[in-house]
Image (cartoon, grey):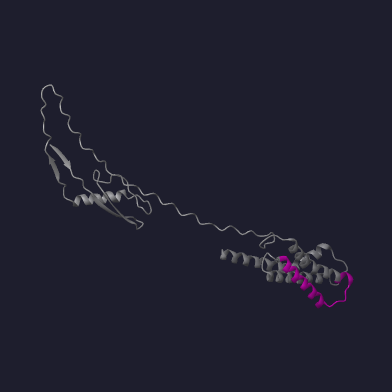
Amino acid sequence: MVFLRMKRMISVKLECACGQRYAFDVEPYKGGMPARVACPACCVDGTSAANAFIAQALAAQPEPVIAILPPPPVVFAPIGAAPPVPPPPPPFAAPARLPIPARPEPPPPKSVPQKQARGKDGWSSDETQINKIGTYIAFGAPLVAALATWMFSLEISTTIICAVVGVCGLIGGVLNILGRGPVVAGAVVGLIISLGAYGACAWWLHDRARVRQYELLIAFVIGALPGIGLQWLLQQILKKRARSAA
């Protein structure tokens, strides 16, 4: 006698740790999954959870019905004739392999904003010829005014000299930052540098018969330091705003 086992399809329903739910029908193989299975969302292996689900389902289901087929009839061939060829056995259907979903491609990395290029003096780009002329005017006007007042004893009001030096500082500051940053910032920086440098140099040269070069240079640098410090502060504020806007 031939015994045939009936196929038992089980509907497996799983929930991944990521929250994704998925289900499929499968014929158990040796009490478990015939192939590996994974979550379609995060590709985490769910074979163990599927095996546990199948084991619970098999325990809850009744035993399958076994069909008993009668044996094939025996045919007696006459003497001298070839024996009959038995029919081929039914093909064995291999358990279907569940396709493993493809691993989702990771999202493209976020583009990191490149560091904005800065000029050598801290503004948005390097100096052009016009910007260099502005630097010469802002730094040269106070020095020339102080030396001219000291060497030639010009009888000109200090207010007038400061006004001329201030105007030169404004023009030089605007030209120095033109096309590289806020014009107002350049004007303020140029004004403070020119007036500060002129005041320090004029104070050091006052009532002196002889002045060495390094002394005049030190006075000029000390007088220009407040304007240079203000320029650095404005550059840091502009850099911070640019990063926030990006």
Residue 203 is situated, as x and y percent measured from the top left of the image, at 81, 72
Q: Is residue 153 above or below residue 55?
A: below
Depth check: 238 or 199 in front?
238
Q: Is residue 161 above or below residue 113?
A: below
Taking 86 as reference, is 36 left or right? Answer: right
Residue 173 is situated, as x and y percent measured from the top left of the image, at 73, 68
Instruction: Examine the structure image and report whether residue 173 is included in the region drawn in magenta.
Output: yes
Q: Quadrant of residue 29?
A: top left
Find the magenta span and give its range. 149-176
Taking 213 as reference, is 9 left or right? Answer: left
Taking 138 as reference, is 68 left or right? Answer: left
Residue 111 is situated, as x and y percent measured from the top left of the image, at 53, 57
Instruction: Examine the structure image and report whether residue 162 is included in the region drawn in magenta.
Output: yes
Tell me which residue sits at (21%, 49%) in the image. Answer: 58
Please tell me how many numbered marks the rendered image carries.
0
Residue 152 is situated, as x and y percent measured from the top left of the image, at 89, 71
Tell me which residue sits at (81%, 75%) in the image. Answer: 161
Quarter of the picture containing the C terminus is bottom right
Q: Quadrant of residue 210?
A: bottom right
Quarter of the picture containing the N terminus is top left
Depth check: 204 or 95 in front?
95
Q: Which is the main secondary structure of the residues drawn in magenta? A: helix
